Amino acid sequence: MIRWLTRRVINMLIVLWLISVVSFIIIQLPPGDLLTATLIALEQRGVEITDDLVDDLRRQYGLDKPPVLQYVHWISRFVQGDMGRSFVWNAPVNELVGERIALTFVIALSSLLFVWIVAFPVGIYSAVRQYSWGDHTATFLSYIGLATPNFLFALILMYVSFRYLGLDIGGMFSLEYREAPWSFAKVLDLLAHLWIPTVVLGTAGTAGLVRIMRANLLDELRKQYVVTARAKGLTETTLIMKYPVRVALNPFISTVGWTLPTLISGATITAIVLNLPTTGPFLVGSLLSQDMFLAGSFIMLLSILTVVGTLLSDVLLVMLDPRIRYAKQAA
Amino acid sequence: MTANGGATGTEAGHEVRLRIRRPFPPAVSPLPEGGRDEAAENRDDFSSQWQLMRRRFLKHRLAIIGSVVLLLMYLAALFAPFLSPHDPTQRNVAYREAPPQRVRLFADGRLRGPFVYALIGEKDRETYKTVYRADRSRAYPIRLFVQGHSYRLFGLVPMKVHLFGTGVEDVPVHLFGADALGRDVLARTLHGAQISLSIGLVGVAISFFLGILIGGVAGYFGGTADEVVNRLIDLLISIPSLPLWMGLSAALPRGWPVAQTYLAITIILSLLGWTTLARVVRGKFLALRESDFVVAARIGGRRDLPIIFIHMVPSFLSHIIAALTLTIPGMILAETSLSFLGLGMQAPAISWGVLLKAAQNVHTLALAPWLMIPGLFVIVTVLAFNFVGDGLRDAADPYAN
């Protein structure tokens, strides 16, 4: 187990390193170097551009060195927690990013919970009552859920609630709490607003997981141990919940690996439609204005959190399922 | 097909036939094509893998519906200028955010055939919103094959004929309403389909190439190559795709012509799209590498490339096709999302995402909900691709139970 974990962590570090390279490439991609954007921003603010200033900035960002050294410069500061400055906001990226990343993850995690809470009973029902009326409904809804892009679902939800309920459901907080410091009341207010992005984001994931749960459970239900359990006289509920469901439960944990990136992606775009103060609108804004330090750091941070989340889910899976545990130990 | 595959196929074919035959006695067949089906099943012993697959696919009802829908969609995209009554770029001040016009059949209680009324916009004195009402003084019949703006069909054939329209210069027919500049939403949706629907196909073609190549190398050679490819796939899967796509497409220069942006976006989408395919290919290669017919070919002195392309690829091509079909909707959704955010296709180009961008805030939506119609097309297309993909996946392995 320890050996497996070590290997897994080393792999993760390699992946993280590669991600940092990708992020750096993205930062470097726009035509011109970082300075072009800074200089334009400074000029717009009425700062006089002198050769001294240019040289100064060049040295400050390490732009007088070759790309590899620039990368080393960037990543070493990143690891120390300094993500550079945003040109547009003229503020350290750290200050801008913190709360937004946190809120993004609150939304992603609550969506994940929503997915589990809904997919679990629906998936079991669909499998146990295969081809029933309820199963067909669930299947139909899953297909629709998978086919509807997040932002469109958010739009429709917003339209319906605005048109028929007279509610403007955008945002994360009510007006009076928007600028207020954190308090218990603000948390409650957050929870009251949280359900909309949660539902919007969770729908596609739920649909996917219901399909997987149904398929897995159907496979399990046909196996001999189920027949045996039934023959020895267990009630149907005990039987299903105790054996096949436990086996079919794996995808709930193992899909976290790819659910999390999807949720984060979805959160990015949903946040723009719903006007949430998360990473989404900020990332798009920084990309559109080519504020590349900000954008690159965002992509890097989101990826780091995703990779760590995936590792945690893998560890959880290994702890839950002895079969996987032994297979890993043997390997 | 190799001898090995053919043999298993025959055995499995027997089973399938026996099971299916019982509920349907051959004499009474309610389906019109039942006779042909029955004859086909009698040939099971001699059916090729592809014949078995086709038969299985045709049994998947949703997949059939999906294929028909997709066929119609792609035809509509191809004939978009002919099908749309208006030029998608034509502005019309008198019809800004005009609601969909109703096609009427009766005037004053008498059947008049399909016709529309012209719309008259009036400013509401309190809200300053334009309110449209139908001008009932004159009915404009909708006629087929009317002359309208000129266009080039398939970009080649100059034409002026449109499927339908009023044929009157100043009286448009907006079945899906008009946007903020008075442009026809139907025409824009149909023209948008050209970019939105084709980007999936082109993207998948590129992913297909990359996936087969990279997955094949990993699966066939194994060892270090396999390890490297696996790490690469791990990496690409663990980055949230949308932010990465956004980052890459933000780097595209704004001033690029439509065709160039299109190609660039497609390549960006394929950069992540190949991973799914590569995994399928790799898995199949690993499984097939040790199988008897490949070993036989190797002993027989075949080189690596012929073994891959003559012996291995045909035996899992069906799986690849199914995986491909399931990759397309993801690409379509990705393009729509990127364009919606303003990071994909840009304004003079028309795609479903660009159109949906107009419907971004709730107040516009409340006034002009018909701007969401392109979204409906996105959903239906993705749904259809998923159905077809499911059908293909089930059919891909006709020898499985």
Image (cartoon, coloured by chain):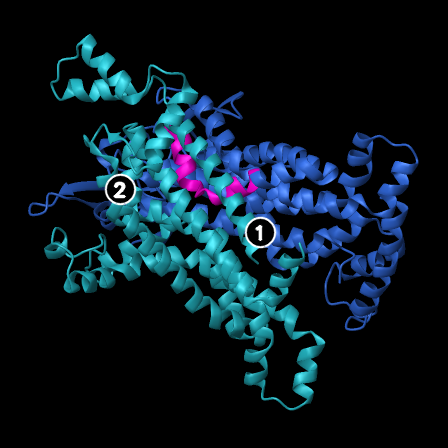
Chain colours: A cyan, B blue
Q: CA distance from mark 1 to mark 2?
A: 44 Å
Residue A8, image x, y percentages = 54, 49
> Residue A77 versus residue B348: which sits nearer the camera?
A77
Q: Position of residue A328 (x, y in %)?
A: 62, 57
Disc ID at residue A97 = 2
Label 1 sits on what residue type? Gly
Chain bearing mark 2: A
Q: Tell whether position B119 is magenta.
A: no
> Between B363 and A28, which is closer to the camera in this rendering?
A28
Q: Which mark is residue A157?
A: none
Give whichever of A199, A245 is nearer the camera.
A245
Res. B66 mark: 1
Chain part drawn in magenta: B232-251
Please indicate whether residue B348 sits to the left or right of residue A192 in the image: right
User: Foreground mark, 1 or 2?
Assistant: 2
Secondary element type, mark 1: helix
Q: Is residue B234 magenta?
A: yes
How far from the left and from the top, in percent, is residue B7?
89, 53
What's the magenta bit mostly, secondary-structure-wise? helix
Residue A329, visible in the rendered structure: yes
